[in-house]
Amino acid sequence: MTDDIRSSRGVGGVASTRGSSASSGTAKTDIVVGIDGSPGSESALRWAIDEAVRRGARIRAVLGSCAGEQPPTVRRSAEAVAGPHDEEALAWAASQILHEELDAVPIPTGLDIVEEVVDASGTEALLTSGRDAAMIVVGTRGRGLLHRLRIGSVSASVAVHSPVPVVVARTRRPSDDAEAGRADSSDSGPAGPAGPAPAGPAPETEADTVHPVVVGVDGSPNSLAALRWAASEAALRGAPLHVVHAWLAAIPLPFAESSAEILPALEDQARHVLDESIEAALGTSETTDTRKVREIDVHKLLVAASATRALLDASRDADLLVVGARGKGGFAELLLGSVSHQTMLHSAAPVAIIRDV
């Protein structure tokens, strides 16, 4: 990096700025991203940079590190030069980890990034720095099945307690597409003799593909807030918006035998909820660019499945999955229950969690 870095000491930490912005105070358009030197936080940083470019926003890259609670990368770096309990070494290591992670990713010309090391836990640092921001972006922890059982305590805590939108960002793993490819080819039959591929149009590349923004709704205030936010995101990306309502987790046993009569009524009711949600959220859009939001391509997805299954299936190839912090009916478990936990763990797409405030 050749950008000029101006440093200033503030309350609770050290802040420095890359780019042209001289202010280190939080603006309502800022994107706050959590940094800890892990692969997950690098994915979060890359996602935040792309989002900041779309919005014309500034990034606040925040690393929380305090006595007794530092990211593992900070502890290891401090141990290498002094010791795990040396305060000066820990402070140096925290600043170094933050600088190194920012230096490791491409930063577009003109994008302002405020770097801040905060004397607080990772959760407290992000919640404090991000309380007035446009959103907080966090990463997932580790790789592989065992690590995927947890998204990380900081990410989970921020998702639960933040009053502003939280995005749990991830980079699509090559194994996701490889496994899907193996599944798709399992019924293709025996392979024939090798030969030249037939002529035809060039295959569509990932860069050419416009992936949808997917949002789950149930008519609750939080899900309507999620729908409005998702519509704005779709407009920013020039992407279609897929609105999902899951209406059938299971039929209670006493009514199972009469399901043929119950199902049509449940489906009609669910369709009404889906239609009313879209009208309530987008018919009188409160976004700053109403025209663009109303011009997006909206697809209604009424799914007879559990909320978790519906969202994971619908978002398999999505650019972003958006859920309300808490819902009712098919989405009752959001945010504090199994649905949000499962989507944050297993969604191939980044997951945004929205509150109606």
Image (tube, rainbow, N blue to C red):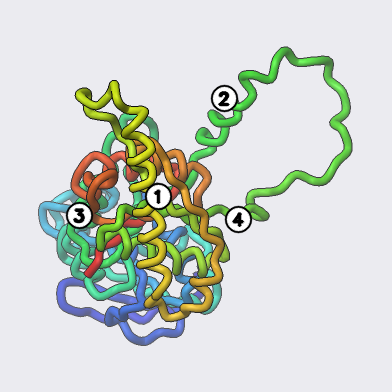
Of the image marks 2 and 1, the number of the one nearer the N terminus: 2
Q: Is residue 82 visible?
A: no
Three-letter residue code for mark 3: Val
Instruction: Indicate the quadrant containing the C terminus: top left, top right, bottom left or bottom right.
Output: bottom left
Q: Is residue 232 visible?
A: yes
Three-letter residue code for mark 4: Val
Which of 148 and 228 lies nearest the eye of the viewer? 228
Tell whether 200 sits left or right of 32: right
Of the image marks 1 and 4, the number of the one nearer the N terminus: 4
Of the image marks 4 and 3, the number of the one nearer the N terminus: 3
The residues tagged by marks 1 and 4 sit, at their Cα atoms, a distance apart of 27 Å
- For disc 3, the marked residue is 160
Tell whether 20 sits left or right of 15: right
Residue 154: give x, y in percent of width and height.
22, 52
- For disc 2, the marked residue is 183
Please report the residue visible at 16 percent of the width from the left and 58 percent of the height from the top: 121
- For disc 1, the marked residue is 271
Residue 18: give x, y in percent of width and height.
42, 76
Residue 194: give x, y in percent of width and height.
83, 19
14 over 148 or under it: above or below: below
